């Protein structure tokens, strides 16, 4: 505590900043004796040159200066002291006579009156206030906050977000829990600032002090000039660089740097965000960098220097200063430091740890502390502080420890007069309660209750102990309870009872005492349980992994249920796992149906590994011992009967006692057959052989895989049974980080990814599946670690037998029998279709891929013969054929046949087929031997079944079968075989019942086949360029066909090789994949092409290429690149980019079309991608040729001239480019263009019309005489242009003049003045102001003609500022004065009074106006009956009656319109005789396309018929005279004014001072896009004095209404069109976010993103801080801007979002960002934001509803989980709203049944809430289920409600039946309503 002067002290005291009682004595009147004593004491202290303490610093002022300062202070405050004393004389006298004994004094107690305080100032919870800077020490570090020990035994909290400055970019939410502990340490001294104080209502006097460590708050007011070398500063580590650390002081004005060589610690010890303390070594003021040194010795010895002019704001707690003792107080010292300041040191902050009553004479040091909870019986009282407490000495070892006991902790009852109860030197019994870290004191307790009970502090609480506690509060998350010693604990909601509690508040009453058991203690967070089983359990408590011994039986509770078991938790976070086999479940029973989360279970420890924190448990406390007969060993074969088929597998009864389970994958070796077998199985089916793989408790794990059953003797059970390099059968059990291969039991081998597949490009998870049968090669066996390393590569694990395909046929036969038995079909048909037998059938149908054969005896059996098996026979439908059976599919009842002669005629006698079948088989097979290598021919390839049918020509065309795949490569791509291909195979099994009568062959390995047979086949193939091939289509793309032919050959057909002659639109439309085509090889693929590896040959299917003529060779020779300019060619689109359309003309020639050459219409240019889709045929004409790149440039329109005749152009020189331009563009051509630049002033437009070719549009060629020709044009806009002139320049370029004027009417042609010869004196012309000088101005009449206007000819009147009256670009109408043809000089005048008056006549001519024209003008005057409007460019005034202002009624015309406003209107009637014009402004008068007419464009030769005047219609003449025949108010007349200035004065007369901003932008017009020209005439109406006074009074009353209406009208209609106009609007609407956002949008339309950002920043700084909504709107617009244009958008949006959170409501900002993410479909970011919002705003119903809505819109699951979380988080009064809204969302975009469940749930609890019934009914009605809705209505009307509540339900029911029901239903509802009324009328009367 310090003061700078008495003046400063007075201010602080007056403001109530000193809460101590002693501070109230500042203005007390002491006796003269006291004053004299105190003054004398002060004088003695000043004269004493020797300080009391050697470390104290003396003042730098001289004695004379000190006397002057004190005298000035006394004089300054003398008057205030006297006034204060007079006002409080009575109170002062009373307090003088009765001084408070417990007054502890204050630093400012009597400083003003020259008296010292009696007591040193203390820091207590009463005088701590927000903004106070205070010193503290870190006592605890938690996950989300820091606990700071403050002076006086206070404790403060620092949230994690307040521990760092925002500029460090540290996300405290996402940081790990150890971040604070890594950044701070316990015992670290820190300077804090008080943020807020929260009073805890539950405990009286308990306050939470919220602190901040942010340096931005501590160093607020610091500047670089205030920092001097030698100062000690605290800084954050902002970043770690190579040469040191960049430091942040929380201020943007300067940074710090700490060199690494100045650090004794290593770099790894420091983290970003850490607080460091250092001494300022040097200051670089130019770079604003402070260099620090953090040497501990230098920091500890550094003392703050005496700086002249230092303020109290620059004092930081923790500063070391030189101080001088001024005096000793009763409980401390008063010091002087830094010249201006004084402060106090209380007794607890002196050096002596035991200051006695003689503490002034001696000091001692002791920093040894004791533990919390320790009890000392003989503690010595050192000092008794009256009214405060006791200082005692605890006899700790080896050194005594000081402790302080507050008066509230002395006794259980209120202690009084401590000096009488306790004596210094006496002994007491004390218990340590805590510590005051900053003072080095322990906190003691003498209360008797502190020594009772087993729990005193958190450290006394142990897991598993039983405690009694009182319930303090009950909430949705659980109950807060308090133990007897005051320690608080949490009882979570699941632990409040054994069962789920819907309303915990009813079971747990606040104040009740219950028994709990402690679940765990973590830091100071204690959790307890009230589950009855746990509380009363007598079993041992398991609170650590070391206590888990085998066989231990204890209680726990289930925390998680998985398919393979349950997780059980015990005390203190100990957790174990119960495998499924130990759950005690019956086979096939689901775990979740037996157990539930939270259930208390008794379990037994089976094994434990404390080091790895694993415990295996069992729910079988006493497992049943099986008999020897029932024991089944692993690896044995058993038989079993199917008992049940479940979704997980098949339950089998083994040996009539044991049960086993066969998972689905273990029913077959083939993945597809497993599901078929499962679907065919029925209870009672018997498995002959099953292999026991493992046991799970009493349940057996079985397999029916043929590969495992067949090799059961070789399967290992233990690691010792495995030999390296052996091949072992197994199955895949896991695919994490590799393949895990399981054998018997739990014996598992691991296959790394590198050893799993031969081709490393394939992914392991895609090559294998869990449960797959595999062959594994043992690579390594480690007996010590028990690890087995295997390989699954096909090259080393290929099958050596045919067990894989044999198992397929055997299981297929079983499945067929099961299906036939189920369908009761006969199997006789299969006996008559043996393999190799000849059958007779009739051609049933001929298809593109073969023929279908039907059989007379079997209607449901069909045969199929592909084209390859027809043997060249021409078959027709109905023909009887004889065929050989190649394969039989018993499941599909399909027979594969062959009609090839070599099969049918191989038997000599074919008359009797069936009797000799067996004999012929023996003849065919008698020469075949096992393991014999044979040559075979592929007959049929069955890719779906993974095998193929082969024939052996050398053995009488015997039929065999070979597999296409193997165990380890089932999911990998298969080797391709084609019909007729020759292969080499080995006979592995002759036909027998075990092979289902088939001859099984084994092909050579895939690798060997690739290197031998495939290569030989390719060498033997005679494919070369020009050969005809039969190819099959494998893929159809927009520009090519992909085909395969021969053995492994691939080719493509380019789209230009599909047809002859003109290119077809889609030449591939009639083709399909799988179709066979005849094609000719035309070339080899180019190796330099992008995808050349996918095809080796280029093919052609053009009809001319498939002929056998001799011209084919000529066609196959490479075609010369021979094209000429102007030639017409056709190509196909293959790419469209931003500027070019790319075509392929042939396989080698490409073409391109510039995007502006595709069309001249802007709409078509805008949708270029839609106009030219890939594959579209386009015809064009060659404009240029690039022979080197084989590239053509095309245009769609024919060329006007062909340069150089028909010669080809190879060199694109400048001359050729210019020549091409002249051939493409000529005068009068219409071309498409894109605006490249809008030139300033009257420069016009620069339009791109070709690649590197631009044309200029002159200002006069933009439109036909519009006031603002540039309006509506922007950069990047597509326009339609007419070429006016093309001329070469001297620099080798081309100059093109363009025009955007396409008007061909007489008026438009007449307005064009292109030649000076067309001008004549007195001719009326129009032009745009080009430049303004002091002597006049120049105007542009056309692109080649300019004219000058002298200053005297600008107007009839005086013009003060020509620049303002005639801005550049303004349209003017004048008369030609003179024309000099030779010098091309033209002079024009704008005067109306000169000459013949033709110009004036034109301006006042009503004949140029036509009924129906749309005009623009300005409001001349506002009257109660309508508006007087001056038409632009004329002096004509029209009247718009109030009835024609709007389609709706107009209440107050004065508030909606005002003089000078720009409006558009439609001419309703023109009275040429009386010069009166009637106008209309209704929206119904205007169509979609509005063209504004001006008198210069109107023709007078069209006569309009007289229009009937309606009732109340007025007509106004050109002078503003109104015909009053229809209006009673005839006093208002208009007169012609002579000067326009008077008209302006009158128009502004009704404008209030607050509306000046509207005058600045009165020329802006959003809808009609017309600017003002001159006002050449003024019409005014003189009012009498009475009318003026009445108008002023009305304007004053409606001021606010007019301002609001004018601003709204401005924003909605008159939106500015330039930056200057926007600036004018902003000056009048600084707080309008609408204007700012429109300004930003305007800048974005000009592609100036940086300017838009600058406008957003301006808006945020300009808008008043009270306008929160307006600021939020700008923030949202800023977020949208960065989301669209940020780089990168995600980071830019996050930065703006973080800034917005500091200024706006965080919830609204979050919702705005969420809406933006959802609108732009950034679902991932939206979901992440929603997760944060549900945590941050967990009490917000809107946030949870957004979470639910997001899930439903993305069609994701998890709605129920979100609802459960929301119900736990939301306050109870929001539950109904949330659940009902969630139900509505489910009805609209989710699952209606789930919505019904929500409604039913809340209606069960609130059955009489008719509002909920109405909502429920509305959703059902909207859904349209009539029966469901009626049932719901019946339930609703059956409730017992009062008639006034039931009446709306009955009415709704009646309306519903009137809509969907009939008369009977309507009568039924009416009858029900009458009965309800009769029944309840009496009840209501009684009520």
Image: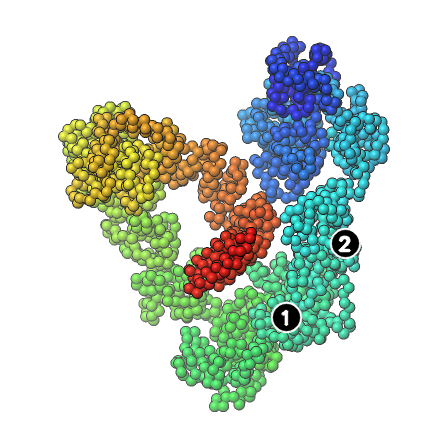
Q: Quadrant of residue 614?
A: bottom right
Q: Residue at x 78, y 31 (%)?
A: 415
Along the line of sight, the residue nearer the viewer: 994 or 100:
100
**Is the residue marked by circle 1 packed among few (<14), some (14-19), or many (20+) residues within 10 Å?**
many
* Label tally: 2
Specify the farthest residue to the top.
64
Does 1295 sit left or right of 790 as displayed? left
Does 742 sit left or right of 1180 as displayed? right
Disc 1: which residue? 650
Q: Label 1, label 2: how many angstroms apart (C-alpha)? A: 43 Å
Which quadrant of the figure contains the N terminus?
top right
**1203 relative to 923, above or below:** above
Along the line of sight, the residue nearer the viewer: 119 or 745:
119
Locate residue 1665, reporting x and y percent: 49, 33
Does 1874 sit left or right of 1804 as displayed? left
The dot on residue 939 is: none
The dot on residue 536 is: 2
Locate residue 1199, reporting x and y percent: 25, 51
Label 2 SS? loop
Locate residue 1160, reporting x and y percent: 29, 49
Does 950 sit left or right of 1193 as displayed? right
Q: Comparing marks 1 and 2, which lies closer to the viewer?
A: 2
Q: Residue at x 31, y 48 (%)?
A: 1162
């Amino acid at each position: 505590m310090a003061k700078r002067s008495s003046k400063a002290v007075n201010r602080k005291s007056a403001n109530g900043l000193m809460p101590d009682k002693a501070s109230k004595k500042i203005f007390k009147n002491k006796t003269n004796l006291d004053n004299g004593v105190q003054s004398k004491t002060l004088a003695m202290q000043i004269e004493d040159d020797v300080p009391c303490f050697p470390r104290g610093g003396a003042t730098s002022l001289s004695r004379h200066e000190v006397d002057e300062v004190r005298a000035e202070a006394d004089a300054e405050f003398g008057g205030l002291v006297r006034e204060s004393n007079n006002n409080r004389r009575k109170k002062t006298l009373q307090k003088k006579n009765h001084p408070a004994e417990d007054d502890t004094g204050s630093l400012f107690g009597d400083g003003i009156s020259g008296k010292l305080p009696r007591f040193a100032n203390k820091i207590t919870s009463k005088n701590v206030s927000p903004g106070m800077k205070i010193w503290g020490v870190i006592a605890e570090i938690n996950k989300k906050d820091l606990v700071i020990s403050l002076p006086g035994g206070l404790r403060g909290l620092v949230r994690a977000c307040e521990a760092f400055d925002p500029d460090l970019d540290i996300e405290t939410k996402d940081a790990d829990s150890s971040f604070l502990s890594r950044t701070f340490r316990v015992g670290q001294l820190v300077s804090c600032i008080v943020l807020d104080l929260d009073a805890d209502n539950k405990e009286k006097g308990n306050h939470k002090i919220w602190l901040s460590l942010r340096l931005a708050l501590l160093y607020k007011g610091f500047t670089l000039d205030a920092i001097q070398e030698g100062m000690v500063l605290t800084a954050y580590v902002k970043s770690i660089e190579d040469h040191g650390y960049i430091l942040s002081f929380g201020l943007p004005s300067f940074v710090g740097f700490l060199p690494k060589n100045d650090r004794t610690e290593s770099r790894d010890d420091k983290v970003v965000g850490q607080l460091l303390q250092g001494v300022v070594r040097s200051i670089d003021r130019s770079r604003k960098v402070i260099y620090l040194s953090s040497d501990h010795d230098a920091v500890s010895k550094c003392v703050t220097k005496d700086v002249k002019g230092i303020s109290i704001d620059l004092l930081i707690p923790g500063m070391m200063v030189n101080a001088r003792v001024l005096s000793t107080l009763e409980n401390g010292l008063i010091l002087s430091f830094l010249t201006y300041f004084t402060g106090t040191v209380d007794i607890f902050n002196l050096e002596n740890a035991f200051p006695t009553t003689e503490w002034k004479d001696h000091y001692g040091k002791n920093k040894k502390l004791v533990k919390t909870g320790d009890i000392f019986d003989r503690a010595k009282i050192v000092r008794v502080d009256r009214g405060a407490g006791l200082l005692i000495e605890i006899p700790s070892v080896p050194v005594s420890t000081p402790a302080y006991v507050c008066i509230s902790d002395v006794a259980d009852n209120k202690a009084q007069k401590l000096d009488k109860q306790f004596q210094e030197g006496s002994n007491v019994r004390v218990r340590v309660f805590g510590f005051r870290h900053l003072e080095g004191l322990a906190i003691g307790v003498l209360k008797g209750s502190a020594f009772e009970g087993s729990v005193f502090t958190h450290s006394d609480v142990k897991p598993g102990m039983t405690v009694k506690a009182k319930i303090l509060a009950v909430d949705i998350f659980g109950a807060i309870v308090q133990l007897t010693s005051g320690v608080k604990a949490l009882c979570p909601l699941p632990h409040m009872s054994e069962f789920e509690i819907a309303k915990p508040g009813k079971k747990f009453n606040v104040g009740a005492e219950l028994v709990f058991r402690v679940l765990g203690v973590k830091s100071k967070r204690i959790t307890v349980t009230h589950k009855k089983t746990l509380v009363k359990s007598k079993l041992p408590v398991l609170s650590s992994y070391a206590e888990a011994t085998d066989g231990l039986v204890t209680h726990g509770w289930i925390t998680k249920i998985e398919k393979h078991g349950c997780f059980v938790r015990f005390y203190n976070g100990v957790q174990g796992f119960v495998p499924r086999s130990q759950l005690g479940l019956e086979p096939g029973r689901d775990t979740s149906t037996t157990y539930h989360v939270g259930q208390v279970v008794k379990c037994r420890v089976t094994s434990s590994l404390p080091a790895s924190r694993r415990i295996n448990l069992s729910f079988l406390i006493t497992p049943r011992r099986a008999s020897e007969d029932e024991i089944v060993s692993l690896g044995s074969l058993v038989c079993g009967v199917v008992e049940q088929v479940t979704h997980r597998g098949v339950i089998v009864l083994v040996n009539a006692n044991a049960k086993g389970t066969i998972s689905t994958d273990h029913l077959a070796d083939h993945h597809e057959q497993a599901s078929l077998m499962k679907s065919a199985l029925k209870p009672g089916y018997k498995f002959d052989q099953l292999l026991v793989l493992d046991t799970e408790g009493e349940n057996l794990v079985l397999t029916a895989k043929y590969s495992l059953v067949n090799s059961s003797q070789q399967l290992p059970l233990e690691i010792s049974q495995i030999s390296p390099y052996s091949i072992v059968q197994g199955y895949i059990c896991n695919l994490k980080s590799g393949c895990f291969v399981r054998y018997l039991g739990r014996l598992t081998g691991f296959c790394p990814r590198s050893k799993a597949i031969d081709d490393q490009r394939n992914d392991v998870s895609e090559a294998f599946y869990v449960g797959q049968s595999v062959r594994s090669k043992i690579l390594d066996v480690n007996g010590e670690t028990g690890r087995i390393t295997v390989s699954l590569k096909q090259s080393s694990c290929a099958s050596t037998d045919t067990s894989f395909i044999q198992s397929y046929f055997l299981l297929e036969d079983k499945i067929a029998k099961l299906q036939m038995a189920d369908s009761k079909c006969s199997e006789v048909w299969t006996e008559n279709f043996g393999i190799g037998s000849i059958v007779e059938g009739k051609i049933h149908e001929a298809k593109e891929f073969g023929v279908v054969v039907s059989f007379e005896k079997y209607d449901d059996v069909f045969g199929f013969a592909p084209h390859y098996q027809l043997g060249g026979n021409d078959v027709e439908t109905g023909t009887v054929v004889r065929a050989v059976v190649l394969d039989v599919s018993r499941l599909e009842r399909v027979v594969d046949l062959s009609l090839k002669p070599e099969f049918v005629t191989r038997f000599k006698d074919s008359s009797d087929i069936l009797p000799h079948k067996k004999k012929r088989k023996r003849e065919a097979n008698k020469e075949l031997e096992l393991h014999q290598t044979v040559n075979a021919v592929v007959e049929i390839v069955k890719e779906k079944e993974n095998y193929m049918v082969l024939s052996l020509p050398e053995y009488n065309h015997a039929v065999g079968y070979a597999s296409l795949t193997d165990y380890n490569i089932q999911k990998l791509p298969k080797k391709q075989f084609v019909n007729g291909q020759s292969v080499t195979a080995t006979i592995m099994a002759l036909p027998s019942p075990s092979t289902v009568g088939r001859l099984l062959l084994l092909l050579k390995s895939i690798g060997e086949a690739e290197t031998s047979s495939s290569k030989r086949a390719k060498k033997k193939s005679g494919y070369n360029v020009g050969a005809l091939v039969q190819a099959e289509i494998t893929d159809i793309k927009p520009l090519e066909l992909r085909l395969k032919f021969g053995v492994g050959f691939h080719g493509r057909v380019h789209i230009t090789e599909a047809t002859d002659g003109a290119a077809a639109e889609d030449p591939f439309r009639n083709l399909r994949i799988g179709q066979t085509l005849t094609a000719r090889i035309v070339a080899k693929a180019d190796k330099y092409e992008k995808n050349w590896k996918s095809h080796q040959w280029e093919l052609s299917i053009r009809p001319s290429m498939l002929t056998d003529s001799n011209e084919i060779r000529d066609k196959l020779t490479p075609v010369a690149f021979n094209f000429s300019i102007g030639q017409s060619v056709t190509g196909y689109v293959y790419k469209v980019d931003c500027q070019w359309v790319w075509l392929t003309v042939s396989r080698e020639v490409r073409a391109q079309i510039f995007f502006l050459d595709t069309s001249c219409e802007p709409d078509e240019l805008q949708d270029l991608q839609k106009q030219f889709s890939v594959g579209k045929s386009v015809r064009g004409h060659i404009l240029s040729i690039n022979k080197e790149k084989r590239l053509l440039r095309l245009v769609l329109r024919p060329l006007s001239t062909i340069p150089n005749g028909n010669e080809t152009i190879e060199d694109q020189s400048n001359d050729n480019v210019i020549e091409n331009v002249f051939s493409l563009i000529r005068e009068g051509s219409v071309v498409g263009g894109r605006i490249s630049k809008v030139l300033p002033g009257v420069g016009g437009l620069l339009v791109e019309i070709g690649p590197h070719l631009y044309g200029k549009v002159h200002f006069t060629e933009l439109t036909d005489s519009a006031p603002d020709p540039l309006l509506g044009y922007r950069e990047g806009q597509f326009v339609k242009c007419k070429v006016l002139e093309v001329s070469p320049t001297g620099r080798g370029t081309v100059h093109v003049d363009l025009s955007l004027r396409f008007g061909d009417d007489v008026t438009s042609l007449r307005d064009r003045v292109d030649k000076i010869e067309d001008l004549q004196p007195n001719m009326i012309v129009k032009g745009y102001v080009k430049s303004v000088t002091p002597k006049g101005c120049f105007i542009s009449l056309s692109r080649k003609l300019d004219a000058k206007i002298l200053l005297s000819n600008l107007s009839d009147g005086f013009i003060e500022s020509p620049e303002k009256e005639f801005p550049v670009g303004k349209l003017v109408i004048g008369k030609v004065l003179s024309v000099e043809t030779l010098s091309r000089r033209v002079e024009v005048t704008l005067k109306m009074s000169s000459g013949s008056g033709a110009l004036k006549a034109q301006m006042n001519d009503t004949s140029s106006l036509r009924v129906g024209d749309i005009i623009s003008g300005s409001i001349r005057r506002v009257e109660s009956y309508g508006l007087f409007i001056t038409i632009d460019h004329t002096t004509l005034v029209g009247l718009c009656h109030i009835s024609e202002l709007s389609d709706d009624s107009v209440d107050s015309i004065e508030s909606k319109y005002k003089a000078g406003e720009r409006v558009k209107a439609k001419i309703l009637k023109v009275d040429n005789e009386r010069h009166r014009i009637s106008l209309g402004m209704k929206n119904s008068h205007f169509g979609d396309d509005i063209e504004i007419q001006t008198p210069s464009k109107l023709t007078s030769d069209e006569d309009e018929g007289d229009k009937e005047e309606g009732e109340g219609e007025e007509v106004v003449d050109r002078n503003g005279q109104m015909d009053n025949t229809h209006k009673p108010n005839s006093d208002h007349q208009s007169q012609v004014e002579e000067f326009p200035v008077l008209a302006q004065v009158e128009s502004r007369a009704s404008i209030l001072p607050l509306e000046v901003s509207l005058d600045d932008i009165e020329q802006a017009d959003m809808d009609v896009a017309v600017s003002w020209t001159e006002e050449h005439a003024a019409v005014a109406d003189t009012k009498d004095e009475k009318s003026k006074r009445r108008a002023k009074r009305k304007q004053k009353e409606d001021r606010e209404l007019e301002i609001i209406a004018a601003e709204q009208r401005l924003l909605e209609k008159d939106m500015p069109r330039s930056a200057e106009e926007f600036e004018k609007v902003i000056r009048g609407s600084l707080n309008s976010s609408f204007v700012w956002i429109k300004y930003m949008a305007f800048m974005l339309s000009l592609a100036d993103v940086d300017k838009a950002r600058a406008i957003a920043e301006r808006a945020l700084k300009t808008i008043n801080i009270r306008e929160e909504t307006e600021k939020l709107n700008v923030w949202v617009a800023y977020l949208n801007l960065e989301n669209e244009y940020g780089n990168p958008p995600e980071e830019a949006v996050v930065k703006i979002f973080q800034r917005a959170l500091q200024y706006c409501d965080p919830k609204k900002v979050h919702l705005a960002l969420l809406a933006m993410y959802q609108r732009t479909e950034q679902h991932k970011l939206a979901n992440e934001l929603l997760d944060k919002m549900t945590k941050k705003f967990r009490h917000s119903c809107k946030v949870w509803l957004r979470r639910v809505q997001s899930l439903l819109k993305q069609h994701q699951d998890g709605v129920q989980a979100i609802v459960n979380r929301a119900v736990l988080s939301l306050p109870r009064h929001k539950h109904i709203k949330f659940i009902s809204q969630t139900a509505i969302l489910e009805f609209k975009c989710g699952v209606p049944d789930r919505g019904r469940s929500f409604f039913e749930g809340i209606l069960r609890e609130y059955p009489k809430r008719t509002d909920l019934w109405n909502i429920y009914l509305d959703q059902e009605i909207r859904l349209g289920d009539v029966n469901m809705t009626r049932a719901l209505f019946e339930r609703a009307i059956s409730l017992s409600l009062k008639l006034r509540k039931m009446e709306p339900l009955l009415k709704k029911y009646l309306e519903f039946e009137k809509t969907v029901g009939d008369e009977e239903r309507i009568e039924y509802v009416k009858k029900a309503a009458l009965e309800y009324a009769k029944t309840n009328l009496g009840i209501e009367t009684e009520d």
